[in-house]
Each structure stands twice: as structure tokens, then as C-alpha cells.
Image (tube, grey):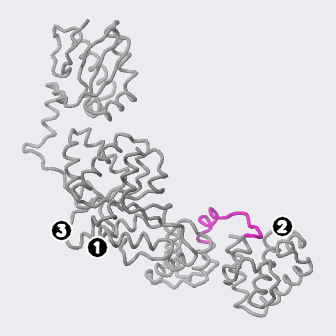
């Protein structure tokens, strides 16, 4: 069969005596004319011609990533072009061969490269370009601490004070969207860089992958690795993005090991714990879980109120407590969205020169609040009312008649009549199998008290707005 020694295709000249090389030159030129100069240089110039074995031609690439990419994007076209050039070839096999020398450019390419490359050797990229700048707004002082996040906050503080402490490397933060993971990571980085002698690289997992791909394209993977592995602290946000990206996972794994072995700190965040991140390699999940794993739980009503109060105070705009309570009840899953709602209210008040009220809140945020609307149930009414008046949920169906319990229970019955389609007997059964006449009395009594006591009426109206949206 043909020569089994792999050959540098780009270095071969037209008219070569080797028919296999000549065929490869024609295949390469056709492919380059189809995909364009930039795409060819980025992905295809590093292909090296290998042997032909029976009816299969072998092409080599220097990395698994390039091999997989070329196979998925250009594999079928390469096979078609080869069949056209050499009817012996029926299949194209792409293989990885480490340590290949990149193909030399043709004379035409060399002219173009000369125009792009500076006369002096380019200095390595600055690390600040490799990472994302830290946001000074995300500090420990601006982070509102409550029960759902106090452990994660304490762990972050510990890492900021003593990076690479035993048991805290890596620090793995996980929780839902908008609960403060990114805030804590920026706070760690900002605290560490205050001294000026600690190098910190923060980036999302997505950026890590894109920079890795760019390094492969520009044949600067060693520079990329050296830069990452020279930092004192590496922080990778939203690690779940690497699920399914096997080559990037492998590079992160080796970077992880190199940094930890050198006594450097790693901080990682994700939406799930390491053990629940299916799709990550087992060895990576094991390493991620060997340090400190801290969960940021969903916010409580009290924490949401504290966050809103802090943000409202910082804005300098007067926001009534009733509005803050309303927002804390309506937007419960995402702190980022909660803060965004408050920012919109403050901006609206500044622009139109009107005070923030419940009415303006519902009007300004109607699109956002609509997304949080859900069908009102008696159980939901009971829970919200019990929470608002600080009584036990079981008191809604208990026989207790103390005013501190009876009045909220009457309000819940009133709202059940107003906001649901349930009949009076059905409502009564939900409140400890009470008679429908008891529900009727509660409805009329609450209506009467609302007329007599504006403060009470405001409380009931707030509850109605929260439930009704």
C-alpha cells in the first residue's frame, strides 16, 4: 500500500512525486476554498497526513479537542473529497498524535501572517485579560446575611482571610440562581486583592472553555496553562456549564490538581452539589468534594425583607414597609430579580417624581409580578396570613378563640371568599370543619373592621394584593 509514514501536508509542494501527498494537497485546497481562510487556519491547518491502510486514510491532529471538532464539523466533507481524489479511499480516520509540529504555511499564507505578527516576539497575555474584573459592589459589607446563607458566608470569609486553609481548599459554593454565589466569590477576590500581593483570577466556566478553545486555535495552550497555574487564587463560576465538555473538563482537572498541589486556593460555584452534578467526570467530582462544600439555601421572608431594606436605604428613596413586604411575599426565588424589582421602583419614582406606593408598585412591576402569579388556594391564603400575623398554621383550624388567633383566622376566611371560587361550606371545612355561618360572620366582621380601622384595612389589602398579584 501507500507510504505509511505520516507526512506534513502543508509543507509539500505541488507536483510532488508522491500521489498520496498530491491528493491531500488537492483535498486541502478544495476544503480551504470552501470554508474560507480564517476558518481553515483556525481548525484545519494543523491536520497532518498519515498512512493509508487498505481503504482508509488516516489524518492526525495534535489534541483530542481538535480531533473531535474536525470530525463533527468537517468529517463527512473530508471523506467525500478524498473519495473524489482517490477511489481507493472509502473512509477517513481522524486520530490524535501528540507532539506534532504545526503545519508550515504556504508562501501565500506566510505573506498574510507576516502582516499580522509584530516584528518583536509578543509578550504573554496579561492575566487581567485572562480573567473577568471583580465587581467592587459585591463586597462582604454589602452581602446581607441570614440563616439560608450564613454558613456559606462564613466559609467565604475564612477563605478570604486565610486562603488554602486545611479543609477549605477547594471551597465549593452551590445553590439556585440569584442567591448570592457570585456575590461571595467577588467578595473573596476583592478582599484578597486589597493587600496587593495576591493574584486572583475569576471567570465563569463558559469563559474558561472559550479561552481554552482560543488557546488551541492560536497554538498557545502552554501559555494558557502557565498563566492559570501561576495565580494564587482561581475562582470558576457556574461549573455546571462544563457538563458534557469532556476536553475542557480534562484541562480544568489538571489545572485544579496543579494549583492545589502547589498550595493555591480554588473557589468553585455551581447550581448543585458536586455529587449531584451528573455529567462531570467522577475524578473531578471527587476532587471538588474533598474540600469545603457550602449550600446557599432559598431565602426566607425575613432575609428578603432585610435585603430589600438594605437596598432601599442605599438608594436614598423612601420605600414604604408595606411595599417591601409585598415584594418579599411576591418574589421569593431569586434575590437578583428581587433587587431588580426594587431598582425599577426607585428609578420610576425618581423619573416621574411620585412616591412609591402599593398601587404604583403593581403598575410598574405588572409584567414581573405576572410571571409570579399562580392560582390562589385556601391553603396558600392560610399560610400567608399565618406568616403575616405570626401565628401557627395549625391555628387556622384549631378551636382557639383568643383574638390574636381568631382575627387572622377571620381574615383568612374573608380572603378565601374574595379570592377563590369555593363555597362557604367548602371554606368552613378547610378551617377545622366550621359551619358556613361561621364563615359568613367572619366575612362580615372583617369588612366592618376594615371600614372602622384604616390600619387594619391596609393590612388586609396588602394580603389581598400579595395573593392576587
Where does label 1 land, which residue?
A: 161
**The C terminus, quarter of image:** bottom right
Closer mark to the observer between disc 3 and disc 1 = 1
SS for tag 1? helix
- Label 3: few (<14), some (14–19) or many (≥20) C-alpha neighbours in 10 Å: few
**Camera-nearest residue between 323 and 205:** 205
Residue 286's disc number: none
**The N terminus, quarter of image:** top left
**Residue at image location 31% in from the left, 33% down from the top:** 64
Tell which circle, 2 or 1, labels the residue nearer the N-terminal end.
Answer: 1
SS for tag 3? loop
Q: In this view, does 86 lie to the left or right of 464?
A: left
Q: Are marks 3 and 1 in contact (CB under 8 Å)?
A: no
Q: Position of residue 465 (x, y in %)?
A: 69, 75
**Camera-nearest residue between 406 and 293:** 293
- Label 1: few (<14), some (14–19) or many (≥20) C-alpha neighbours in 10 Å: few
- 40 up-or-down from 165: above or below: above
Where does label 2 land, which residue?
A: 421
Amino acid at each position: 500500500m501507500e507510504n505509511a509514514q505520516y507526512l506534513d501536508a502543508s509543507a509539500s509542494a505541488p507536483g510532488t512525486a508522491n500521489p498520496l501527498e498530491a491528493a491531500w494537497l488537492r483535498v486541502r485546497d478544495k476544503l480551504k476554498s470552501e470554508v474560507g481562510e480564517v476558518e481553515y487556519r483556525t481548525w484545519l491547518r494543523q491536520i497532518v497526513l498519515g498512512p493509508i491502510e487498505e481503504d482508509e486514510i488516516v489524518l492526525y491532529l495534535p489534541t483530542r479537542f481538535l480531533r473531535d471538532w474536525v470530525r463533527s464539523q468537517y468529517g463527512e466533507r473530508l471523506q467525500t473529497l478524498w473519495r473524489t481524489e482517490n477511489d481507493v479511499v472509502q473512509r477517513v480516520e481522524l486520530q490524535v498524535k501528540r507532539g506534532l509540529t504545526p503545519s508550515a504555511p504556504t508562501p501565500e499564507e506566510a505573506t498574510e501572517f507576516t502582516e499580522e505578527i509584530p516584528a518583536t516576539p509578543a509578550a504573554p497575555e496579561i492575566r487581567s485579560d485572562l480573567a473577568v474584573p471583580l465587581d467592587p459592589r459585591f463586597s462582604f459589607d454589602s452581602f446581607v446575611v441570614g440563616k439560608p446563607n450564613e454558613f456559606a458566608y462564613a466559609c467565604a470569609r475564612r477563605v478570604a482571610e486565610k486562603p488554602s486553609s486545611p479543609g477549605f481548599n477547594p471551597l465549593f459554593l452551590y445553590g439556585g440562581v440569584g442567591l448570592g454565589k457570585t456575590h461571595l466569590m467577588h467578595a473573596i477576590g476583592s478582599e484578597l486583592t486589597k493587600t496587593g500581593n495576591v493574584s486572583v483570577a475569576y471567570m465563569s466556566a463558559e469563559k474558561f472553555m472559550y479561552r481554552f478553545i482560543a488557546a488551541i486555535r492560536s497554538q498557545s495552550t502552554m501559555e494558557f496553562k502557565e498563566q492559570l497555574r501561576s495565580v494564587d487564587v482561581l475562582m470558576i463560576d457556574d461549573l455546571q456549564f462544563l457538563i458534557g465538555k469532556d476536553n475542557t473538563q480534562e484541562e480544568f482537572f489538571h489545572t485544579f490538581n496543579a494549583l492545589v498541589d502547589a498550595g493555591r486556593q480554588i473557589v468553585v460555584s455551581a447550581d448543585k452539589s458536586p455529587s449531584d452534578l451528573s455529567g462531570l467526570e467522577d475524578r473531578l467530582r471527587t476532587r471538588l468534594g474533598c474540600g469545603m462544600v457550602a449550600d446557599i439555601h432559598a431565602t426566607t421572608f425575613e432575609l428578603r425583607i432585610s435585603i430589600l431594606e438594605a437596598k432601599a436605604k442605599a438608594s436614598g428613596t423612601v420605600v414604604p414597609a408595606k411595599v417591601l413586604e409585598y415584594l418579599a411575599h411576591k418574589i421569593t426565588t431569586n434575590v437578583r430579580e428581587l433587587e431588580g424589582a426594587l431598582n425599577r421602583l426607585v428609578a420610576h419614582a425618581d423619573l416621574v417624581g411620585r412616591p412609591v406606593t402599593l398601587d404604583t408598585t403593581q403598575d410598574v412591576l405588572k409584567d414581573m409580578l405576572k410571571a409570579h402569579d399562580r392560582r390562589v388556594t385556601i391553603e396558600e391564603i392560610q399560610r400567608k396570613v399565618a406568616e403575616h400575623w405570626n401565628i401557627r398554621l395549625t391555628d387556622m383550624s384549631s378551636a382557639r378563640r383568643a383574638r390574636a388567633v381568631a382575627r387572622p383566622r377571620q381574615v383568612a376566611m374573608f380572603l378565601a371568599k374574595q379570592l377563590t371560587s369555593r363555597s362557604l361550606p367548602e371554606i368552613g371545612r378547610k378551617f377545622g370543619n366550621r359551619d358556613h355561618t361561621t364563615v359568613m360572620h367572619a366575612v362580615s366582621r372583617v369588612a366592618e373592621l376594615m371600614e372602622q380601622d384604616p390600619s387594619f384595612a391596609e393590612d388586609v389589602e396588602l394580603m389581598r394584593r400579595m395573593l392576587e398579584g
